[in-house]
Image: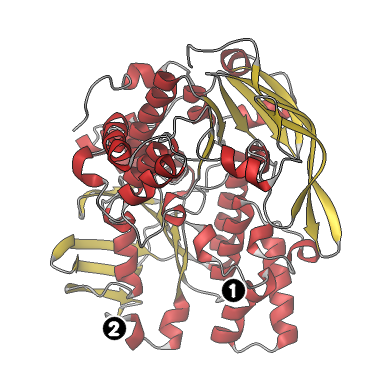
């Protein structure tokens, strides 16, 4: 992508081995991987959940998670060996010469400080700029990242900007010291398609402009096609194959890579008959303070069916879910369960009413208690809602772990920090199922999963729905997921429903103009798609 490469590698990893502790034993995570990266080059790192992508990306900074250790090999950054370097040496490189952009910007920013305060901290601390220079540079970077009101947005707190804006602010912050290497760890995974398009354009423009080398960790093949010069495929901590992006897209050599390239084939069986509404939202309006966020929403969630709710960031999808759960009491309108009106506030609902509606959260990193083991996390709703004794609880926990394809013997005593992002998301699914609900709100439940694992989760949810007659509200920005699992589709924009009906009605032409925009913003596995769709910005953005 960049134009400032030379033949001398900026980053050389040779025979790297990383191990993680499970109880008293050490298990391999990275098994002797080699990697070379030159200045101005972008390497796409792909593979299914648990392949070791994020672990390898962090190792490129000389960093390992708690409970992990370097067990062999070397990591040289511009000639400096990082696996045995002192803490002072590694700390001096981070944020100045090497930067990291996390998957969850919301979990990475300090909520108590304004964006500008956090942005300028390292440029000032490292002596790169004065505070005034750092603030002026931040505004310019915000402009490059196509953030609205670049002169003003830095003085907001993290909760006062959208998810897409926060992700771009994090990328701008990573660029603050003009690092030579940036690790992007799934930076667009949780974003809707239109916001993702803007973030990808902004990131690519910034990387090209500064000639920055980058490792782009992702499970989204269409995204990596837009960003990477080369692609490395990982499986269970080992390199499967590596090649220039265009070569690998055109002709992957290994069967595993071909399976990643395959278009998702799963389609949930079509259901006959519309069915009666299990949950019914009638003319619901809601607000945050005096700001309206939902306007006269009417949606039936029919029993035994999956209703996908789609729309860009800020459209009101998750807010509608909060209103249904009673977390954001509607200012008007009603929510009914099996024909019975539910109290507006969850505090006023009975334990049985609470049990019947459960939620699987989008950000597994922040949804799981880091101090509890997996068995405790899944077991708590079994005890709370079902009153199960310890033996019954433990048996149900093991059964749920088997349902989500995690070995109980291996995972029941782990902490969330010992799991990959996809594994954490599956634990969230098991926890929701533990209460034996009738209605489950799935809030972007496959957004953190690679295509193969996501397909397995969709199959699991479909099987459970058939076996237990579950009703799903499926919040997603992934049109492929909508096509795979939805029976009905609701399209939201600015707190209103702009299109609704069966999947065939909503996703077949003639489209509502906004639905057409969403469909047109889905990345394609073509390295030139982003350039054709929206050329990188060259001037100030509004």
Q: Which mark is residue 351?
A: none
- Residue 214 x/y as whole percent: 54, 28
- N-terminal of the pair, mark 1 or mark 2, is 2
Q: Nearer the viewer, residue 61 or 230?
A: 61
SS at circle 2: loop
Residue tagged by mark 1?
434
Crowd rating for badge 2 (residues with CA inside 10 Å; few <14, some 14–19, many 20+) = some
Rendered residue at 72%/83% (across/down): 392
In space, the residues marked 1 and 2 are separated at their CA atoms by 23 Å
Residue tagged by mark 2?
343
Q: Is residue 398 left or right of residue 181?
A: right
Q: Nearer the viewer, residue 403 or 317?
A: 317
Q: Is residue 439 above or below residue 101?
A: below
Q: Is residue 501 left or right of residue 254?
A: left
- Residue 179 x/y as whole percent: 49, 30
- Tell me whether circle 1 and circle 2 mark residues in contact (CB < 8 Å): no
Picture quarter with the C terminus: top left
Which color mode does the image show?
secondary structure
- Tally the numbered discs: 2
Q: Is residue 539 above or below residue 514?
A: above
Rendered residue at 60%/27% (across/down): 261
Q: Is residue 492 left or right of residue 485?
A: left
| Residue 489 makes an appearance in the image | no
Residue that protrudes farthest toward the right in the picture: 25
- Residue 333 x/y as whole percent: 18, 72
SS at circle 1: helix
Crowd rating for badge 1 (residues with CA inside 10 Å; few <14, some 14–19, many 20+) = many
Rendered residue at 31%/54% (across/down): 114
| Residue 218 makes an appearance in the image | yes
Q: Quadrant of residue 140?
A: top left
């Amino acid at each position: 992508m960049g134009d400032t490469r030379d033949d001398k590698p900026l980053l050389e990893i040779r025979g790297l081995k990383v191990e993680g502790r499970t109880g008293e034993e050490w298990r391999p995570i990275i098994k002797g991987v080699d990697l070379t990266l030159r200045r101005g080059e972008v390497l796409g790192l792909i593979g299914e959940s648990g392949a070791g992508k994020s672990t390898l990306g962090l190792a490129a900074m000389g960093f390992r998670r708690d409970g992990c250790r370097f067990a062999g090999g070397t990591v040289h950054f511009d000639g400096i060996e990082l696996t045995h370097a002192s803490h002072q040496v590694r700390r001096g490189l981070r944020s100045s010469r090497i930067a990291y952009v996390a998957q969850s910007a919301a979990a990475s920013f300090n909520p108590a400080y304004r964006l500008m305060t956090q942005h300028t901290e390292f440029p000032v601390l490292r002596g790169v700029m004065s505070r005034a220079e750092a603030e002026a540079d931040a505004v310019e970077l915000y402009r490059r990242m196509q953030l609205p009101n670049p002169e003003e947005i830095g003085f907001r707190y993290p909760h006062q900007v959208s998810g897409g804006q926060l992700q771009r602010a994090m990328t701008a912050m990573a660029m603050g010291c003009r690092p030579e290497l940036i690790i992007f760890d799934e930076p667009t995974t949780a974003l809707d398609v239109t916001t993702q398009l803007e973030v990808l354009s902004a990131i690519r423009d910034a990387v090209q402009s500064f000639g920055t080398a980058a490792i782009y960790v992702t499970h989204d093949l269409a995204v990596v096609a837009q960003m990477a010069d080369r692609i490395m495929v990982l499986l269970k901590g080992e390199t499967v194959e590596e090649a220039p992006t265009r070569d690998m897209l055109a002709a992957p050599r290994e069967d595993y890579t071909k399976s990643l390239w395959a278009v998702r084939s799963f389609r949930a069986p079509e259901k006959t008959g519309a069915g009666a509404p299990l949950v019914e939202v009638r003319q619901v309006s809601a607000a945050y303070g005096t700001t309206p966020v939902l306007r006269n929403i009417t949606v039936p969630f029919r029993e035994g069916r999956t209703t996908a709710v789609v729309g860009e960031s800020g459209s009101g999808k998750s807010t509608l879910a909060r209103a249904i759960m009673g977390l954001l009491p509607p200012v008007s309108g009603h929510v009914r369960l099996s024909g019975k009106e539910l109290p507006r506030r969850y505090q006023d609902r009975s334990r049985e009413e609470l049990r019947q509606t459960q939620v699987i959260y989008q950000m597994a990193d922040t949804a799981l208690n880091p101090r509890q083991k997996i068995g405790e996390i899944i077991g708590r709703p079994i005890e709370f809602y079902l009153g199960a004794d310890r033996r019954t609880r433990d048996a149900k926990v093991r059964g749920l772990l088997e349902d989500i394809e995690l070995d109980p013997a291996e995972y029941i005593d782990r902490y969330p920090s010992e799991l990959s992002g996809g594994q954490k998301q599956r634990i969230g699914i098991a926890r929701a199922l533990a209460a034996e609900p009738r209605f489950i709100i799935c809030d972007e439940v496959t957004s953190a999963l690679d295509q193969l694992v996501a397909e397995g989760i969709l199959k699991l949810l479909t099987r459970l729905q058939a076996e237990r007659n579950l009703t799903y509200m499926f919040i997603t920005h992934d049109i492929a997921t909508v096509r795979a699992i939805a029976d009905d589709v609701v399209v939201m924009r600015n707190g209103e429903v702009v299109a609704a009906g069966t999947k065939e009605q909503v996703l077949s032409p003639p489209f509502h103009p906004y639905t057409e925009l969403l469909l047109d913003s889905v990345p394609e596995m073509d390295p030139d798609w982003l350039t054709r769709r929206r050329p990188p910005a060259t001037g100030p953005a509004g």
